[in-house]
Image (cartoon, rainbow, N blue to C red):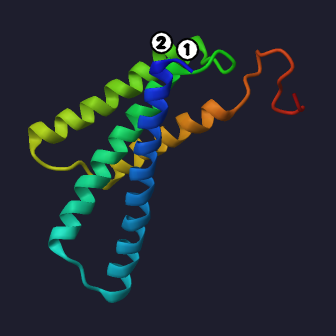
């Protein structure tokens, strides 16, 4: 394994652990506040900030991962030159807009960004129809 792949795999592992841990704690806090009908302003602000920041970061990280894939799982040219740059630009635009306006975007924007990131990750797992021996309806 070359040095770049070694570093990126460790950074991705650290990022995954942080995002997973935050997501789990956020769910627990959300249920806690729903059932007790009480919330803490400081934690609410922190949850919104971290949720927004980690969502945008994770989508950018997911899209950027197509540029460092191994040779056995190459991305399509459309993904590499159109889809990934467009999504990365969109996420950076959302982040820049939030910083310049000084407030977080609506929850639907954050939810939409997370769905884009999840769809990109799922798309990477699907075998491509144009690859020899792969089909959606048959085994490899």
Q: Nearer the viewer, residue 90 or 48?
A: 48
Q: Count up the numbered dots.
A: 2
User: Badge 2 local density, few (<14 within 10 Å), some, or many (20+)?
Assistant: few
Q: Residue at x 43, y 28 (%)?
A: 7
Please tell me in which quadrant of the rendered image residue 138 appears. top right
> In which quadrant of the rendered image does the N terminus lie?
top right
Residue 79, x across and y down, in percent? 54, 19
> In which quadrant of the rendered image does the C terminus lie?
top right
Distance, label 2 to label 1, CA atoms, is 6 Å
Q: In the displayed structure, does residue 3 sit left or right of residue 40?
A: right
Q: Secondary structure at mark 2?
A: helix
Q: Which residue position holds label 1? A: 78
Residue 125, x across and y down, in percent? 66, 34
Q: Is residue 58 visible?
A: yes
Q: Residue at x 41, y 36 (%)?
A: 11
Q: Is residue 109 visible?
A: no
Q: Nearer the viewer, residue 14 or 119?
A: 14
Q: Nearer the viewer, residue 126 or 93?
A: 126
- The mark found on residue 13 in the picture is none
Q: Is residue 16 above or below residue 137?
A: below
Q: Which residue position holds label 2? A: 81
CB contact under 8 Å: marks 2 and 1: yes
Q: In the displayed structure, does residue 5 sit left or right of residue 140?
A: left
């Amino acid at each position: 394994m070359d040095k770049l792949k070694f570093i990126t795999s460790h950074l991705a592992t650290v990022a995954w652990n942080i995002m997973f841990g935050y997501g789990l704690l956020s769910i627990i806090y959300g249920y806690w506040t729903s059932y007790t009908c009480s919330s803490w302003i400081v934690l609410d602000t922190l949850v919104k900030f971290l949720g927004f920041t980690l969502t945008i970061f994770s989508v950018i990280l997911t899209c950027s991962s197509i540029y460092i894939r191994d040779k056995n799982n190459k991305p399509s040219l459309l993904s590499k030159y159109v889809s990934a740059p467009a999504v990365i630009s969109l996420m950076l635009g959302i982040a820049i807009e939030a910083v310049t306006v000084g407030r977080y975007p609506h929850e639907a924007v954050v939810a939409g960004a997370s769905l884009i990131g999840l769809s990109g990750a799922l798309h990477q797992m699907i075998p491509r129809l144009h690859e020899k021996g792969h089909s959606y309806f048959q085994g490899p």
